[in-house]
Every structure is written in structure tokens, then in C-alpha cells.
């Protein structure tokens, strides 16, 4: 009898904990993703804002190669800064998520992808995080992780701790 009550008590505790975690799942994970991505992209944007334009030495893939490097630099800088602010507040989260995903894919194709690869083994060699070594293998791991981190924000939105959520609630309660 005592064992049965202990098991029932443990099960109720487990159920209530899971219920609480399920409630938080609509707010906390997306908030954490937004905060870390805002920090990373804000930092990159401010580095560009205060740095020199190294895009002049980069060959962009089509159609971005049609845009002058100075304009590409400005687009990247301001999308990273504005995107970081928007992610921080949870404003237009899906728009900025897809925008920063595209920016990141262009960065992967432009500077992080291996120079040449003939096999999946060669391609896999670029799945790493390293400073530029000039070995031609690339280093697309971190930007790919960012793309994956953006996917819940793109598909699920900003979560409950966001301006997007407040706007949605106000719109539904009209």
C-alpha cells in the first residue's frame, strides 16, 4: 500500500511537471533562440558597421553578384542589426528569420563553403568551426547551426514573450 501511494505521488509529480513544461514550451525555447540569435547577428552587424568592407574581396553567387559589394555590405550590416533588434523584441520574427536565413545561406555559399569538393567526404571536411586557414575546406558548421536555429522561429513564430504575440492577441480580441 505504501509503495503504491509513493508511485502514485511520483506519477502525479511527473504529470504536473510535464504539464508545466508544456506550458513553458510555447514561450521559453523561442525566447532563448531569439536572444542568442539576436546577440550573434547583432554582434556581426555592429562589427560590419564599425569595420572595413571586406566584401570587395569576395565573389558573391548569382544574383547577389549583380549587386555592388558596397551595397551588399550595407544590406548585410543593416539586416543583421535590424534583425537582431527585431528578434530581441519578437517583432516580425518570421520575416527576419527568413531574411537572416537567406543572408546566412549567401554567407555559406560565399565564404564558408569548401572551395572545391569531389566527394561527400571532401564536403564533410568543411563541416567545422575554424578561423580561416586558407586550406580550402571551408567552415560552414556554425552558419548551418544558425539556419537550423532559425527554423523553429520561422515555422512556429516568436512565442508568447514577444511583440508579435501581443499584436496577435490584440488582433484576436477585436
Image (cartoon, grey):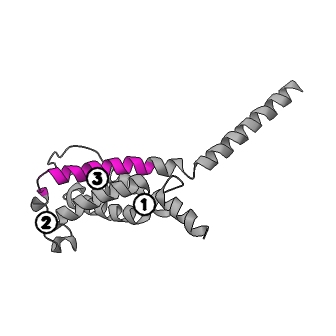
- Residue 53 located left or right of residue 98: left
Q: Which quadrant is home to the C terminus?
A: bottom right
Stretch of the chain drawn in magenta: 33-54
Q: With respect to residue 9, does 71 lie above or below?
A: below
The kind of secondary structure element at disc 1 is loop
Say which of marks 2 and 3 sits in front: 2
Residue 28 on image: x %, y %: 52, 47
Earlier sequence position, callout 1 versus callout 2: 2
Mark sitting earlier along the chain (2/3): 2
From the image, tell me which residue sits under label 1. Answer: 91
Q: Earlier in the sequence, mark 3 or mark 1?
A: 1
> Which residue is depicted at the point 28% across and 44% down?
129
Indicate the quadrant containing the N terminus: top left, top right, bottom left or bottom right.
top right
Q: Position of residue 141 (x, y in %)?
A: 32, 50
Residue 125 visible in the displayed image: no
Q: Secondary structure at mark 3?
A: loop
Residue count near mark 1 (Cα–Cα under 10 Å), binned few <14, some 14–19, many ≥20: many
Q: Which residue is mark 3?
A: 140
* Residue 139 position (above or below residue 154): above
Query: Rounded to the nearest whole Å, what is the CA distance between mark 3 and mark 1?
Result: 28 Å
Magenta span: chief secondary structure: helix
Q: Is residue 44 magenta?
A: yes
Q: Which residue is mark 2?
A: 69
For the residue carrying disc 2, how many other residues have a C-alpha within 10 Å: few (<14), some (14-19), or many (20+)? Answer: some
- Spot occupied by residue 116 in the image (x, y as percentages of width and height): 20, 59
Give residue 86's position: percent from left, percent from top. 38, 58
Amino acid at each position: 500500500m505504501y509503495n503504491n501511494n509513493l508511485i502514485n505521488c511520483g506519477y502525479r509529480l511527473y504529470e504536473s511537471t510535464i504539464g508545466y513544461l508544456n506550458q513553458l514550451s510555447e514561450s521559453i525555447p523561442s525566447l532563448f533562440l531569439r536572444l542568442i540569435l539576436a546577440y550573434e547577428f547583432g554582434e556581426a552587424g555592429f562589427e560590419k558597421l564599425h569595420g572595413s568592407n571586406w566584401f570587395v574581396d569576395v565573389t558573391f553567387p548569382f544574383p547577389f553578384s549583380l549587386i555592388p559589394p558596397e551595397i551588399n555590405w550595407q544590406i548585410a550590416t543593416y539586416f543583421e542589426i535590424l534583425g537582431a533588434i527585431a528578434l530581441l523584441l519578437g517583432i516580425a520574427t518570421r520575416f527576419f528569420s527568413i531574411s537572416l536565413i537567406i543572408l546566412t545561406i549567401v554567407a555559406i555559399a560565399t565564404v564558408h563553403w569548401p572551395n572545391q569538393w569531389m566527394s561527400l567526404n571532401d564536403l564533410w571536411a568543411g563541416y567545422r568551426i575554424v578561423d580561416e586557414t586558407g586550406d580550402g575546406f571551408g567552415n560552414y558548421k556554425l552558419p548551418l547551426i544558425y539556419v537550423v536555429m532559425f527554423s523553429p522561429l520561422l515555422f512556429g513564430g516568436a512565442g508568447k514573450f514577444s511583440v508579435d504575440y501581443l499584436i496577435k492577441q490584440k488582433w484576436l480580441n477585436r
